[in-house]
Image (cartoon, helix red, strand yellow):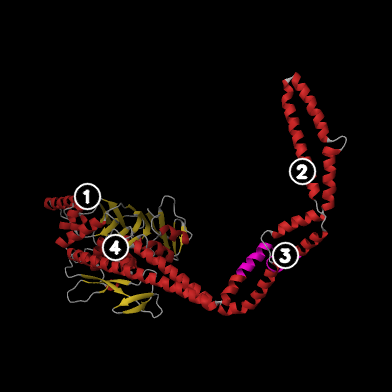
Amino acid sequence: MLRSLHIRDYALIEQLEVEFDSGLNIITGETGAGKSILLGALGLILGERASTEAVRAGAKKAVVEGLFDDANEGGLPHLLRSHEIEPYPSGALVVRREVSASHSRAFINDTPATLTVLRAIAEHLIDLHGQHEHQSLLRTETHLELLDDFGGLGGLVETYRTHFEEVARLHRKRADLVKRESELQQQKALFEFQIEEIDRVDPQPNEEESLDAERRILENAETLFEATASLYELLYESEDAIYDRLVVVRNGLRDLARIDGAFEATLGEVQSAEIIVEEATKFLQDYNARIEFNPERLESIRERLGELEGLKRKYGGSLDAVLEHRKEIGATYDLAADFEGAIARIDGQIAEAQAKLSDAAYRLSQKRHEVAERIEEMIQQELADLGMPHGQFVVDFSREPDDAGWIAWPDGKDTVCLRALPTGADLVEFYITTNVGEAPRPLAKVASGGEVSRIMLALKTILAKSERLPILVFDEIDVGISGEVARRVGESMQRLGAYHQIIAITHLPQIAALGDHHFLVEKHVEEAPKGARTKTGIRRLSDEERTREVASLTSGEALSEAALESARELISAGKRGEG
């Protein structure tokens, strides 16, 4: 929601700070007081183009800053990071626009941003009704998403999207395969030679390490034989052998331990050393007995290592690289040798995947039509309640035939091919008319002013729970209405306030009385050393001030007790939900 709006040196506003709340925020004020200036300032932080004439006379620059919260929801965090803008941990989002005589700058969370980025961010924050640029419902691309959200069709959409991505992957795989056909045929002869060369040597995993270890042993057989024999003699066979000395020490310690138990621990350690020396002598004796002097085997190993080295030099520098290369060229060779079979197999996979896609698209479309019927009926009733009894609302479905389309669609006894979109087979656009005898037209071409705002209100009231935009701003919504219709418009906005933050500018007491919060825009003349200056400000009204403001909307400046009592009744009825 829009937590606060700060404006400095913009048009008639010298300094203004207003804090909004959740629910229905009503803004009133006399004609010319500056309500349109307030919306103009809001438009700046939504990415509208700035005019240097908007800078207050005598000031260097105009500054507009909006503080939004709940910016961690929906797709906004991803959008921010994609433009290298870090969200605040609190979820707050600060959007600032500065306009001077020479240039305009925008900042999001103190990071400079282009107007394109600003507009993209704003589309996730605010719908401004009264100026078409920020009306999400006037953008055709949002209609299908709104329909799916309202009907709770997310599961079916996701199922369809999974099949769509699988079909797209298989088509890419087939296209890559066809593109590689000539290349594969050219590589076939080369790979055949390489496969034959590698397979003739037939390298095995970890073979090189095993051979190299055996080579080192055979090359040093004489050294190993002499060293193990010498060590064995030193430990066990010589007249002064270590083992014999340990036996003498062990026997001496045993005699001492009989006298003093303090020698027991040392006796145990020497006995352990005796056992270790005995095991070492056995190992040396066994190893010495197994040593081979085999020059033929050594020469065979050297030749084998030479063959492996040759493969390594040609195919990657390591035996693992050689084996991986053999695997890759083997797969490529098999593919080249059976290219037609590979194409046939992938065509079969595509046919199977497209059948699943077609089924998912058809089931999704059937559900969408059911949801569309409910939406049409509910919105037409809402239009009637808002003073447009002849309103007709139509969810228009269309599909794009395509001979190469991925979706097979039943058409009577025949089947036609349709273009598959990432969202299904359906193209959806909202159509509407509010006049008898007029055929429904695309929503994007409806009339401007109060009528379009009421149409938007009707749509959003029905789609409120599924509409993602948290903030809705309504201007001119009361143009051409009064009495009972005005009351219904106010009630509709009040209900909508349960799901969104609503900011509404109105001149009608029936609407103003229903607000959760009431703000007054005022203009006054202030004397200054260089002459009088007109300034615009805004303030939140107390309960008593609100009563007087609603009364003034009814009877003008001369407030009678009857007008005040009527205002109190309107406000009280609004709080009770009676309108």
Amino acid type of the residue tagged 2 in the rendering:
Phe
Please tell me whether residue 268 is drawn above or below residue 72 in the rendered image. Answer: above
Q: CA distance from mark 1 to mark 2?
A: 104 Å
Amino acid type of the residue tagged 1 in the rendering:
Glu
Q: CA distance from mark 1 to mark 4?
A: 43 Å
Residue at which label 2 appears = 283
145 displayed left or right of 478: right
Q: Which residues are magenta?
A: 306-328
292 displayed left or right of 19: right
| Magenta-drawn stretch, dominant element (helix, strand or loop) | helix
For label 1, count other residues whose C-alpha is less than 10 Å away and answer few (under 14), some (14-19) or many (20+).
some
Q: CA distance from mark 3 to mark 1?
A: 95 Å
Q: Give the quadrant of the N terminus.
A: bottom left
Residue sitting at x 41%, y 79%: 404
Q: Reading the chain from its start, which is encountered first: label 1 or label 2?
A: 2
Amino acid type of the residue tagged 4 in the rendering:
Gly
Secondary element type, mark 4: helix
Residue at which label 4 appears = 151
Q: CA distance from mark 2 to mark 3?
A: 34 Å
Total marks placed: 4
404 displayed left or right of 488: right
Residue at which label 1 appears = 545
Secondary element type, mark 3: helix
Magenta residue check for 118: no
Q: Reading the chain from its start, which is encountered first: label 3 or label 4?
A: 4
Q: Are marks 1 and 4 in contact (CB under 8 Å)?
A: no
Amino acid type of the residue tagged 3 in the rendering:
Leu
Name the one closer to the observer, 578 or 506: 578
